[in-house]
Image (cartoon, rainbow, N blue to C red):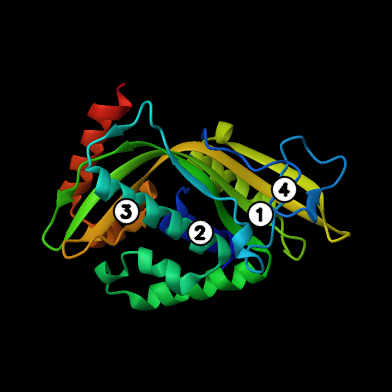
């Protein structure tokens, strides 16, 4: 399986964002999360130093925020708070490469193909250590649907602005440009920017190649009826009808999309 195929699967199943044209607070250009990490002179103005989040998970600059002025929410505040806390955890665990814990926020109980999940974890971990990082920078929540209950679960839909990165560290062997068309197909050409820059950490210089995505997106939230533990799927799940049918009823998906279109998209 090629590296770009793995990235497509990872984006489909775990980020989507996805993982958002966002109005969240951006990290400082100097890389102030770590005074010893900064971009080198001559880097693009928008470039921000990228910490190795496997070694330093506490440096993750991820932010999940809410549009307190224009938010269209049809969910109780207590439930929404849990959803957003679990969403942050889900993105953070992906950013730092904690795959087993991250997969607790993927609805694996809804699919019989457990071998597929094992392969996904193995491939994501492989490319993570080969220098390719899928990283959510942040998301700004602008729409929250009501819950729709099925036999054994409840499902909701979030509308959000996503800031998302593909970071290619210096040890990555391959051409990042191979991902451009795939990203443009998912998010639109205007949502994609590509940067190459050197960054300096503890006096050592390393090349970073990076796609940054800023796009409007959405995400499905699934939870069992017994407890509010949130699991997430990107909207691209609809492009895999068989997998989508395993995760939720088609009627549920259509009902949520109609609600978002009528109560948020048309405004």
Circle 3 residue: 82
Alpha carbon separation for disc pair 2 and 4: 19 Å
- The reply to whether discs 2 and 4 touch (Cβ–Cβ < 8 Å) is no
Q: Which of marks 4 and 1 is nearer the N terminus?
A: 4
Residue 5 visible in the shown view: no
Residue at image location 64% in from the left, 61% down from the top: 132
Circle 4 residue: 32
Rendered location of residue 102, percent (x, y): 44, 67
Q: Secondary structure under badge 2?
A: helix
Alpha carbon separation for disc pair 4 and 1: 19 Å
Residue 212 visible in the shown view: yes
Rendered location of residue 81, percent (x, y): 32, 48
Q: In this view, does 228 lie above or below 216?
A: below
| 149 displayed left or right of 39 | left
Residue at the far top: name it: 267
- The reply to whether discs 4 and 3 touch (Cβ–Cβ < 8 Å) is no
- Quarter holding the N terminus is bottom right
Q: Is residue 46 above or below residue 3?
A: above
Alpha carbon separation for disc pair 4 and 3: 29 Å
Circle 2 residue: 92
Mark number displayed over residue 167 = 1
Q: Secondary structure under badge 4?
A: loop
Q: Secondary structure under badge 1?
A: strand
Residue at the far left: name it: 151
Mark nearer the viewer, 3 or 1: 3
Residue 245 image-quadrant placement:
bottom left
- Comparing 167 with 227, the one in front is 227
Q: Which of marks 3 and 1 is nearer the N terminus?
A: 3
Mark number displayed over residue 68 = none
Alpha carbon separation for disc pair 3 and 1: 29 Å
| 245 displayed left or right of 212 | left
Mark nearer the viewer, 3 or 2: 3
């Amino acid at each position: 399986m090629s590296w770009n195929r793995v990235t497509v699967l990872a984006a489909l199943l775990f980020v989507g964002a996805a993982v958002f044209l966002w109005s969240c607070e951006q990290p400082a250009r100097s890389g102030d999360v770590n005074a010893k990490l900064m971009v080198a002179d001559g880097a693009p103005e928008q470039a921000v130093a990228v910490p190795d989040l496997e070694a330093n998970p506490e440096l993750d600059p991820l932010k999940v925020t809410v549009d307190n002025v224009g938010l269209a929410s049809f969910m109780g505040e207590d439930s929404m708070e849990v959803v957003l806390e679990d969403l942050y955890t889900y993105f953070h665990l992906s950013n730092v490469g904690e795959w087993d814990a991250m997969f607790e926020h993927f609805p694996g109980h809804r699919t019989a193909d457990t071998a597929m999940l094992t392969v996904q974890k193995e491939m994501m971990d492989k490319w993570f250590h080969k220098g390719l990082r899928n990283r959510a920078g942040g998301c700004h929540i602008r729409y929250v649907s009501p819950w729709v209950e099925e036999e054994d679960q409840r499902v909701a839909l979030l509308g959000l602005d996503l800031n998302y990165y593909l970071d290619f560290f210096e040890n990555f062997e391959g051409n990042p440009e191979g991902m451009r068309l795939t990203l443009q197909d998912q998010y639109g050409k205007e949502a994609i920017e590509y940067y190459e820059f050197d960054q300096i950490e503890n006096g050592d210089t390393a090349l970073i190649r990076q796609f940054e995505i800023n796009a409007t997106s959405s995400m499905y939230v699934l939870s069992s009826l017994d407890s509010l533990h949130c699991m997430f799927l990107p909207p691209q799940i609809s492009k895999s009808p068989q997998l989508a049918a395993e995760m939720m009823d088609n009627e549920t998906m259509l009902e949520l999309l109609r609600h978002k279109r009528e109560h948020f998209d048309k405004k």
